[in-house]
Image (spheres, rainbow, N blue to C red):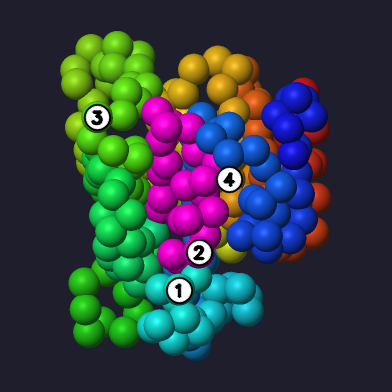
Amino acid sequence: MKLDDIKKYNLKQGDCITVLERYESKSIDMIFADPPYRLSNGGVTCKSGKMELVNKGVWDESMGFEEDNKFNYEWLKACDRILKDDGTMWISGTYHIIHSIAFILLKMGYYIINEITWVKPNAPPNLGCRCFTASQETLLWVKKSKKAKHVFNYATMKELNQGKQMRSVWNIPTTPKREKNQGYHPTQKPKELLYRCVISSTNENDVILDPFCGSGTTGVVAIENNRHFIGIDISEEFLELTRARIEEII
């Protein structure tokens, strides 16, 4: 698919590895990927003061160490093909997958610009009481090589941080209820998190792609800030949620 066919936003249903084959090589300015964390293993968490299973869906179940790594390699290679030489990728994850992804990226020759720690001040408590309470996620911000001339809107981010250099530890609460008015997705990211990623590493009219679109927060932030958006998800239900959220603001 040529980028001339993309208007303000474009949503595609299907496996991202297959769908990405339709797009021109080196045509995307920035990719934000929130891949399956493989957390749906029968564990429990605390939600609204009650114990609940963490199972999010079949798409989040582990396929085993080798298959999980193979999947990460395949979608990263598919993203690498369509990313511009000076483009960047953001990948979010917990310790369940992020080290696999970092290893694959380094093996592919990518350069890690920053490792961002997203601290959740309102993270749910640990019910097992046999380990520390998980209260952060990692975001890798990467480019194709160390010499690639990536976009970084330094002055904008400094201004956003009250005139001080923005550091790599971001204290941002989990997604507020007001951002879930169109429906529910179990891994929805807060707009404030995506705003920092989008504004720091893209310019107006850039094309941003999310291969695991989910509830569409990437798209909402992109459209609100005069970027173009491509969203891919295996679930038609979640794509409709994305569409509803975007249509609400345009």
Q: Quadrant of residue 187?
A: bottom right
- As helix, strand or loop, the secondary structure at mark 2 comes to helix
Q: Nearer the viewer, mark 2 or mark 4?
A: 2
Query: Does the stretch in magenta take in 82?
Result: yes
Residue in front for this viewpoint, 19 or 32? 19
Which badge, 4 or 3, is on the more N-terminal residue?
3
Kindly tell me whether residue 18 is visible in this rendering. yes
How many numbered callouts? 4
Residue in front for this viewpoint, 147 or 42? 147
Q: CA distance from mark 2 to mark 4?
A: 15 Å
Kindly tell me whether residue 189 is visible in this rendering. no
Image side of residue 237 versus residue 206, left or right:
right
Amino acid at the residue labelled 3: Lys
Please give the residue where the numbered disc 4 appears in the rendered image. Answer: 210
Which badge, 1 or 4, is on the more N-terminal residue?
1
Q: CA distance from mark 1 to mark 4?
A: 20 Å
The label on residue 138 is none
Q: Residue at x 74, y 39 (%)?
A: 1
Q: Residues within 10 Å of mark 4 (few under 14, many from 20)?
A: many
Image position, residue 202 (x, y; %): 46, 23
Q: Residue at x 73, y 32 (%)?
A: 2
Please give the residue where the numbered disc 2 appears in the rendered image. Answer: 74
Q: CA distance from mark 1 to mark 3?
A: 28 Å
Please give the residue where the numbered disc 1 appears in the rendered image. Answer: 70
The label on residue 147 is 3
Q: Is residue 247 above or below residue 238?
A: above
Q: Nearer the viewer, mark 1 or mark 4?
A: 1
Amino acid at the residue labelled 4: Asp
Which badge, 3 or 2, is on the more N-terminal residue?
2
Amino acid at the residue labelled 1: Lys
